[in-house]
Each structure stands twice: as C-alpha cells, then as structure tokens.
Amino acid sequence: MQFGIAGAGFSGAVMARELAQAGHQVTVHESRGHVGGNCHTERDPDTGIMVHRYGPHIFHTGNERVWKYINDFGTMQPYNHRVFSTIGGKVYSLPVNLLTINQLFGRTLDPEQARDFISEQSDSSITDPRNFEEQALSMMGRPLYETFFLGYTRKQWGLEPTQIPASVLRRLPLRFTYEDSYFAHPYQAIPREGYTAIVERMLDDPRIEVHLSSPFDPDQHDRFDHTIWTGPLDAWFGHRFGRLGYRTLDFEEIRAEGDLQGCAVMNYGDLDVPFTRISEHKHFAPWEQHDKTVAFREFSRLAGEDDIPYYPVRLAQDKSLLQTYLDAAGQEPRVTFAGRLGTYRYLDMDVTIADALDAANIMQRAIRARDRIPALLAQE
C-alpha cells in the first residue's frame, strides 16, 4: 500500500518506520523545514549547545517496549531532571517535596510530621474535586497551592484554576521525602545527539520519502491508499465546526558568558513576572562543557490561527466541540488521525511512541484481514 503521512514528529516518524519495515511505501509531508516536530533539537552555531528549539523535552518512561525501541535509533544519555521555582524573591525545590514544605513554612518536619501537617492544611470537605483549584486544596491546602500553583497556572493556561480540569494537577506528585527528581519513571534520558537525529534515523528507510517545507493538503489525500494525519484534528476539516483551543509558546532568547542560573529550568510563579520559566539549555546535557550559555524565557498564550499549537486546552466547551470532530473523523474514508494534535490529547513522548507502535500494528492487522483501517485508534 501507499501511505501518506502528514507530519514528521514522533507519531508520523514511528508509524512511517513501522509501515515501511512491513513493506509499504510511505510519503511524509512536513510543513516545517526539519523533522522532529516540537521535539526538534539543533546545535547552536555560536556556542555549540544542543538547543531544544520549541522548549525542553525530557524523555521519561516506564514502558520497556518504548525504551528499547527509542534506543535502537540513538544513544539515550541518562538525565535526572530537576526543577526550581523563584517566588517572592526566594528559590524553592519542585515538585513539592519535604524540602519545599520545610522551606515555605520555616519548619524542620520529618516525613510523618509533614504528612500530618499537610493533612491539617488540606480541605477534607472536598471529596470529589471538580477542577484544578479544588484538587489542589484537597491535596495540599491553600498555602502551598497559592504559592506554587495559582500564579503559575494562570500564566501557563491563561485561565482561572477553577476553569481547568482536576486531572491536570493529579499528574504532579506531592512528596514527603527529600526526593526532588521531577519524574519518577525508571528510564529518564535525553538523546546524546538530540531528538532530531533520532527521528531522522527512524525515517531513514528506502521505502520512506520525506518532503520538508511541504504541508500536506487534505484535499489531495486521494493520491494515497491511506492517509495518516498528525496535524490538528480540526484543521483536517478546515475548522468547519469551529476552532479547538490550543496553547502556544513564545520564547525570548538570553545569551551570556558562563552559567546563567545554575539549573536547567527555573519556574517563576509570581503573577507580576510575565514569563512562566527560564530554560538554560546546556544543563540538559551535563555531559558536555560550554563556556557560554543560551537560555529562553517562556511565555504562554492562546494559539492564534497562524501559531504553532503546543498542547490542547480541553475545557468543557472544547470537549463538546471535540466530540463533534471525533464523530466526523470516524466517518472519514481512508484516513487515520494520530498523535497529540490529531487526537487532541496531551501526550508525553513515550505515550506518543507507544500509541504510534500500536496504531501501526492495528493497521497491518487490518490490511492482512482486508478490513477497513480505523480512523481513530486511541482516545481518552
């Protein structure tokens, strides 16, 4: 079969690889001038630092299959991600852990004392949190919530925490030890040669043809036996039912000698600071040495028509509109929707790869059985 794939991020690249290895011809169209999607990395010509061009990406997973798969395409260098936050002129450790609690409250609590103390702070009357704020108040109480999450969340989402689903906060840990690793997965790494090199190797197959700076036109998908769309779900339909909400990011570059902040990521939770965080990219490769530094202030806002969408908002009204698009997608002939944008889900890289591997397997089984390939292969 001849497959057409819109997008050369992880979803498109993994599916292209798997289908090509199964003997199919694959044509990938990528609107940008590089592969890798928002995970794209490149060497800064002045400093030699590996820059995560669309914001930092840390690979973390507990999925053995995905871990083995990505290691087939490059060296994954172990990396333990740590995040700090500047609030009210003080620096704290994140995610919230025993050090953070003792710092904020000026205590020397041990784990059990801290657990009891936060239990007293928490709002036990909230048994079924309906939104981000209620989840925070029931989980940690008002002081921790207002210090570390209220201002940052307003800036990151452009919304009041009462408008954001409780599930957003449930992904973040609350620890009663001094463990300050941001992620808890057993495998945490960054590719030694960057993510773009990984994706380039995935696409390095004689049955795969890649066209850069070449947007995929949905009106021409009949050129292929089957199309895989990893762009925004609503864009496939020309936004005919309305636009789904996405957030986008703006970056302000900082260049300096030496070390700017001494860590990879520093959050800024105060509302009077307009950016959400500063990422200093040489710290994402501590195995390298650089005399100069490159960092980026990060500003979050609602994506406009011409902006790069980073992640879905998924408010109540978006979920209603999403269902309309999902119903329409299910009726599309010879098209499969995949990836973070194509399924309108917030996916980490490992889940993106796992979904793509599963999707490719489902497609191949359908082809062998002469069944219709499903339009939607995964959805929350």
Image (cartoon, rainbow, N blue to C red):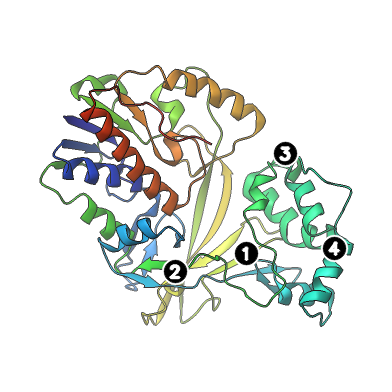
Q: Calculate the distance from the C-alpha at mark 1 to the C-alpha at mark 4.
A: 26 Å
Q: Quadrant of residue 369?
A: top left
Query: In the image, which disc is placed on residue 281?
Result: 2
For label 1, the residue is 267
**Quick one: quadrant of the C terminus?**
top right
SS at mark 2 in the image: helix
User: Residue 323 location in percent, x, y?
Assistant: 55, 23
Query: In the image, which disc is placed on residue 325?
Result: none
| First in sequence: mark 4 vs mark 2 | 4
| First in sequence: mark 1 vs mark 3 | 3
Looking at the image, is mark 3 or mark 2 nearer the viewer? 3
Q: Residue at x 69, y 75 (%)?
A: 177
Q: Residue at x 25, y 35 (%)?
A: 364
Rate crowding at label 4 as few (under 14), some (14 to 19) or many (20 or more) other CA atoms within 10 Å.
Answer: some
| First in sequence: mark 4 vs mark 3 | 4
Q: Calculate the distance from the C-alpha at mark 4 to the C-alpha at mark 3.
A: 25 Å
Cβ–Cβ under 8 Å for marks 1 and 4:
no
Residue type for callout 3 = Gln
Q: Calculate the distance from the C-alpha at mark 3 to the C-alpha at mark 2.
A: 32 Å
For label 3, the residue is 163
SS at mark 3 in the image: helix
Residue type for callout 4 = Ser
For label 4, the residue is 119
Q: Residue furthest toward the left?
A: 206
Q: Residue at x 64, y 27 (%)?
A: 317
Q: Calculate the distance from the C-alpha at mark 4 to the C-alpha at mark 2.
A: 38 Å
Residue type for callout 2 = His
Q: Is residue 168 left or right of residue 50?
A: right
| First in sequence: mark 1 vs mark 4 | 4
